[in-house]
Amino acid sequence: MVNTILITGATGTIGSELLKQLSSYDTSVRAGSHSNSFKDTPENVVFYDVDFTQPDTLRKAMQGVDKLFLLTPNTPDAVHMAQNVINEAIDADVAHIVRLSAYTDPEDSQNPHRIVEDLIIASGLTYTFLRPGPFMQNFANFFGHTIRTQSALYEPLDDAQVTYIDARDIARVAARTLIEEGHGNQSYHLTGPEALSDYDIARILSDVTGRSIQYINISEDDARQSLQNMGMPSPTVEGVLGLYTLMREGKREQVTNHVADITGQPATNFETFVRDHIEAFLPE
């Protein structure tokens, strides 16, 4: 049995779901976040105020921790934040770090996710890297407004095939890799069970909601303007546009079986995701 696990980024989409997953295990869980915004905290979870830029908060949260789930925000200083966590994990003798990374191209050595992975490997810590593809939740969180109000999905993807993954599946995998043995120094590319184009996405949304939802293929310049209008900082915008390029090049269409192999349950398909989040796609 793992005695104590620290979950960073615990109030986010994956972190909060991971807390739910771990609540069914006989273990002590610490939820690390800079704000205690939990709606329902499981009984075996203790909140710790964690600021990645303040090593003393990390040091306090990591005392007596056996395993660590490392999720850093998508900000320009993410690598520096991760280095602070790694330093404190070494000093605290953390036995295993599970890093929420991302699927990147092997030749892209300057990708922040790759840099953090290299830092963890160099640290000598036992690690597991979770490398998911694009989240299904993006359709609800970022595109839900135009789907609800305009019956339209706007992206610059042409007919690219992409293996989207449900964030709940990522959390299920994370829970297993934190609790079970056999995942040390392993890397898992996590995907959903199928590759879909946005035309397929629009068809599934239409079938499930009973509405006629269209995919509108927009230019990269229009996508940049839309992302800027959402308030995204320029580095984040360019990162998203870079991901769109990789998708159009067919570099996000591979399907893997890691979710099923690790959890014993098949990865969630997009139709199921839509049914479970139907309110995000219905008119307001």
Image (cartoon, helix red, strand yellow):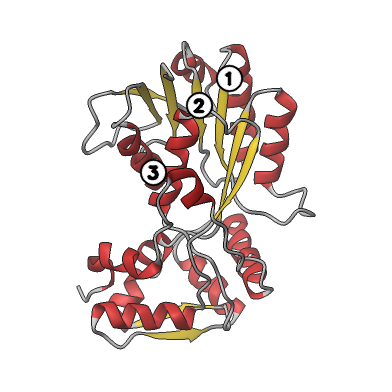
- Provide residue 132's location: percent of width, then percent of height: 54, 52
**Residue at 57% of width from left, 33% of height from top?**
183
The local secondary structure at tag 2 comes to strand
- Contact between labelled residues 3 and 2, with CB atoms less than 8 Å apart: no
> In the rendered image, which residue does mark 1 sit on?
89
Q: Which mark is residue 125?
A: none
Q: Which mark is residue 68?
A: 2
Instruction: Work out whether 22 lies above or below 211.
Output: above
The local secondary structure at tag 1 comes to helix
- Provide residue 189's location: percent of width, then percent of height: 60, 51
Instruction: Work out whether 125 lies above or below 225.
Output: above
Marks 2 and 3, how far apart in space?
Answer: 16 Å
Badge 1 local density, few (<14 within 10 Å), some, or many (20+)? Answer: many
Residue 100, picture quadrant:
top right
- Contact between labelled residues 1 and 3, with CB atoms less than 8 Å apart: no
Marks 3 and 1, how far apart in space?
Answer: 21 Å
Residue depth check, mark 2 versus mark 3: number of the one nearer the observer: 2
**Residue at 41% of width from left, 43% of height from top?**
172
> In the rendered image, which residue does mark 3 sit on?
12
Residue 72 seen in the figure:
yes
Instruction: Work out whether 29 lies above or below 176.
Output: above
Instruction: Name the amino acid, label 2.
Output: Leu
- Contact between labelled residues 1 and 2, with CB atoms less than 8 Å apart: yes
Instruction: Name the amino acid, label 1.
Output: Ala
Instruction: Work out whether 50 lies above or below 233.
Output: above
The local secondary structure at tag 3 comes to loop
Which mark sits nearer the N-terminus, 2 or 1? Answer: 2
Q: Nearer the viewer, residue 115 or 264?
A: 264
